[in-house]
Amino acid sequence: MEVILLQDTEYGDKGAVVKVRGGYARNFLFPHRLAVPNNSGNLRHVEDIAAQRQKKIEKEKQEVQSLADKINGAEEIEIKAKGGENGQLFGAITHQQIADALNASLGTQIDRRRVQLKSVKEAGKYSVPVRLTFGITAAAKLKVTAEVDKKAAAAEKKVRKPRKKEEIAAELEAQEKASVAAVQETTPQE
């Protein structure tokens, strides 16, 4: 018996015309609405559904492509993070932070899992690949700036003076005298 599949099964994909045993079709496929008999009316109906589905897919592709064009044409997105004067960040810029910045600036709903950039740990400019559906990829421009804490920067600048040999020798002598005095106090006197 030839049937038209309404859903993907082990016999074939949705919309395919396949040959199955009559009992299997009547007892399983038809009651579970997985297939319909192969006749001209059902075949036309399935073709109409396939055409509607194809139109929907084309419309979604156009929407995704327009989103990719919007991301590619967008201005540079800036993210500020705490960091040192040398441009090294104290943490890392995460995928979630990048996605939030993209969504805020473009008014979109991009999921963090779509952002394909490795973690950002230094200030600078980056090209962020964003993987969308239907194999479409866009590239957003990202600028990461390090905000320098003035107190931390002053502490970094403060350079420890090298000690002189005389200071080291005097410190060692003082420690030696203290240890000799401690030993004399703990030993019993006769």
Image (cartoon, rainbow, N blue to C red):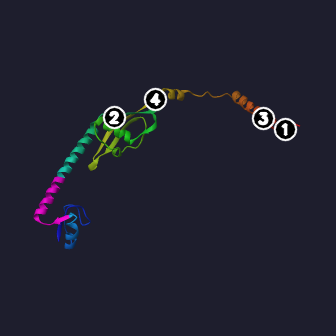
Residue highlighted by disc 1: 188
Which of the numbered marks, if any, corresponds to residue 62? none
The first of marks 1 and 3 along the sequence is 3
Q: What range is drawn magenta here?
A: 35-53
Is residue 116 covered in magenta?
no
* Residue with the mark numbered 4: 148
- Tell me: residue 45, above or below residue 105: below
The CA span between labels 2 and 3 is: 66 Å
Q: Which residue lies under the disc numbered 3?
A: 182
* Marks 1, 3: nearer the viewer: 1
First in sequence: mark 1 or mark 2?
A: 2
Residue 21 seen in this snapshot: no
Which badge, 4 or 2, is on the more N-terminal residue?
2
Q: Which of marks 2 and 3 is in front?
A: 3
Query: What amino acid does circle 4 point to?
Result: Val
Instruction: Compute the Cα span from label 4 to label 2.
Output: 20 Å
Q: What type is the residue that disc 1 sits on? A: Pro
Question: How far across and how far down the image is residue 11, in percent?
Answer: 24, 67
Return the disc, 3 or 4, that comes first in the chain's sequence.
4
Q: Which of 164 and 63 is in front in this view?
A: 63
